[in-house]
């Protein structure tokens, strides 16, 4: 993102007041009087990925001739569905096959966090993480798999608790080579033979 978003807390507070009035509540009631301020602060935190550039997230790399899979599993993430502004959460699994560069594991976590902290759809979130790793590390291949539960489906609409959505983004040899892709998926899901 080239220009970083600036939050207009006053607009958020006014919007929350309108929502409260719209559902028949009194925004001046004791329990709700500070809700608009709390929601504005919460949105500032939950959507902080809109205010940060992704260009420097993976800029500290190490040159290493490691030619095997690097996999970081079970990275917990929380995001907000852009369709209903309801949370979705789950685990990200990030793998790459180095092409001469590696990165610290915490940087992979930061990449997931960065893109999760904005209004999202899971499909785009998955692709953004894979594309950033591909661009920054120039690996032979990248695999990103996200598993998440969406409250817009478990608390409203079809109301199906326990449903998990899985998305994947494969790049390079991991996409092209079935054996490599199967090895990574086996490592992620515990089915290595």
Image (cartoon, helix red, strand yellow):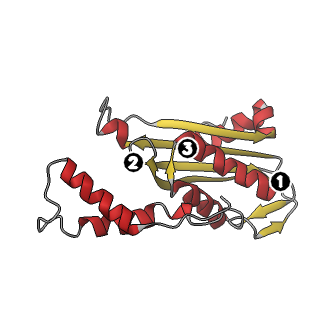
User: Mark 3 or mark 2: which comes first in sequence?
Assistant: 2
Q: Are marks 3 and 2 in contact (CB under 8 Å)?
A: no
Q: Secondary structure at mark 2?
A: loop
Instruction: Determine the image quadrant of residue 160.
Output: top left
Along the line of sight, the residue nearer the viewer: 41 or 178: 41
Instruction: Determine the image quadrant of residue 32.
Output: bottom left
Q: Secondary structure at mark 3?
A: strand
User: Distance between the Cα atoms at labels 2 and 1?
Assistant: 34 Å
Residue where numbered disc 2 is placed: 85
Residue where numbered disc 1 is placed: 138
Q: Is residue 25 left or right of residue 138?
A: left
Instruction: Determine the image quadrant of residue 4.
Output: bottom right
CA neighbours of label 2 inside 10 A, class few (<14), some (14 to 19), many (20+):
few
Along the line of sight, the residue nearer the viewer: 53 or 115: 53
Q: Between label 3 and label 2, give the one nearer the viewer.
A: 2
Residue where numbered disc 3 is placed: 146
CA neighbours of label 1 inside 10 A, class few (<14), some (14 to 19), many (20+):
some
Q: Quick check: 136 above or below 123? A: below
Q: Secondary structure at mark 1?
A: loop
Residue 151, position in %: x, y? 35, 43
Q: Are marks 2 and 1 in contact (CB under 8 Å)?
A: no
Label disc, if present, on residue 21 of the rendered structure: none
User: Mark 3 or mark 1: which comes first in sequence?
Assistant: 1
Q: Residue at x 39, y 34 (%)?
A: 163
Q: Quick check: 32 above or below 91? A: below
Q: Is residue 115 left or right of residue 151?
A: right
């Amino acid at each position: 993102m080239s220009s970083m978003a600036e939050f207009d807390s006053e607009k958020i507070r006014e919007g929350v007041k309108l929502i409260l009035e719209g559902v028949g509540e009194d925004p001046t009631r004791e329990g709700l009087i500070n809700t608009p301020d709390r929601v504005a602060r919460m949105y500032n935190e939950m959507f902080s990925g809109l205010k940060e550039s992704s260009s420097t997230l993976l800029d500290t790399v190490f040159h290493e001739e490691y030619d095997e899979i690097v996999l970081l599993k079970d990275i917990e993430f929380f995001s907000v569905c852009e369709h209903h502004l309801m949370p979705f959460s789950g685990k990200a699994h990030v793998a790459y096959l180095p092409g001469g560069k590696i990165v610290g594991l915490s940087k992979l976590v930061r990449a997931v966090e960065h893109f999760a902290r904005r209004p999202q759809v899971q499909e785009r979130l998955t692709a953004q993480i894979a594309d950033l790793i591909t661009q920054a590390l120039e690996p032979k291949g990248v695999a990103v798999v996200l598993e998440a539960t969406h409250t817009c489906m478990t608390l409203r609409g079809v109301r199906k608790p326990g449903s998990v959505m899985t998305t994947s983004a494969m790049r390079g040899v991991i996409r092209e080579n079935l054996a490599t892709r199967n090895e990574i998926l086996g490592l992620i899901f515990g089915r290595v033979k």
